[in-house]
Image: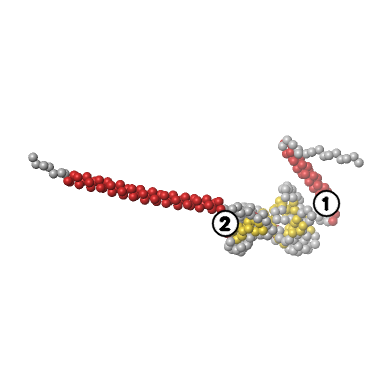
Amino acid sequence: MKKKSPPYAIIGAVLVGILGIFLLMRWKAGIDANNAALLKANSDALQQQIDELKTKAQAQTVVTTDPNMRQVYYAVEPIQAGQKISPALFEKKLTPNDVLPDAYSDGTDLVGFYAIRPIEKGDPLSPHNVGKTLPFLAERIPAGLRAVALPIFNAGDVNNTGGFAVDGDWVDLLFTHFTPDGKLLENTQTVLQNVQVLYIPQTQTRSDMTVGVQPTEPRSITFLVTPEEAQMLTFMEHVENAKFSMILRGRNDRQELKLRPWGIESVDDYRKVQKQTDKSYDRVAALQKAIEDAEKKEKASQGSTNETTPPTPPSP
């Protein structure tokens, strides 16, 4: 019987397969080792960053602000008049409290304000150069209304308001006619009531109780009116032998009256002055009583008059 030879081809294939598996396992082990090393390196780097941040946080100290100092806003570049203020235009700097006391500081949000005059780099921002609105008269005119200037104060004229009318006050406008020779008055009449003053030039005059404006030179006063009133006033301004005057009224008084033109034909007509003034005082007294009654009624409706019994004066 013939003897069989061993299967060398099969044995070789098995050995090659075993060697391939061994090499594949070695390759995978190397990849896993590299990934583990990379992961550990990243973890160590991240931990190092965390440790550095912790160290910095622990090393930080609380910086106390000097109570005599405050953060003041300063321009970091030139700002043109009318330019809107943005955060890029200013920075904060510690400034002694007794220096620039009116300058804007931390407590004010300037974003959206306007430069009301040119500001140089390094200038402090204050109400003198920055405001909430632009100081242009046109900004103060509501839609549908107009501003008109009238020559209320002419050379040698007196101030019919006593010198205490200021911007924002309410006045009545009077119109006076003269005879052609200018020596006698023909009549004075109220042409507009409840007219708001937009602007009065000149310096202030001051008393113990109030502040006003006293023009001492020829001046025009600017009023807030409707377009129709502006036409009428402009026409009347050019009437010969006539002039405008204004009289001051209370800011809370909006009552309008029907008044006849006032005039006299002879000295004897002055006798009617007292009769008319008596009627006017009666009207004022009635108005004030009506206001008092309305206030009492309002207090009563609230359940309390908020009034207390006056103390009994001591016996003499």
- Residue 113: x %, y % from top left: 61, 56
* Residue projecting furthest to the top: 303
Dot 1 and dot 2 residues touching (CB under 8 Å): no
Q: Quadrant of the N terminus?
A: top left
- Residue 70: x %, y % from top left: 65, 56
Give me the residue at 77% from left, 61% from top.
157
Mark with earlier residue (1, 2)? 2
To which quarter of the image does residue 282 belong?
top right
To which quarter of the image does residue 220 belong?
bottom right
**Viewer-side residue, 224 vs 180:** 224
Amino acid type shown at disc 2:
Pro
Q: Is residue 281 visible?
A: yes
Q: Quadrant of the C terminus?
A: top right
Residue 261 relative to residue 117: left or right: right
**Viewer-side residue, 283 vs 237:** 283
Amino acid type shown at disc 1:
Val
Asked which secondary structure carries label 2, the reply is helix
**Viewer-side residue, 84 vs 200:** 84
Residue position marked by numbered label 1 in the rendering: 273
Residue position marked by numbered label 2 in the rendering: 87
Asked which secondary structure carries label 1, the reply is helix
Give me the residue at 74% from left, 63% from top.
217
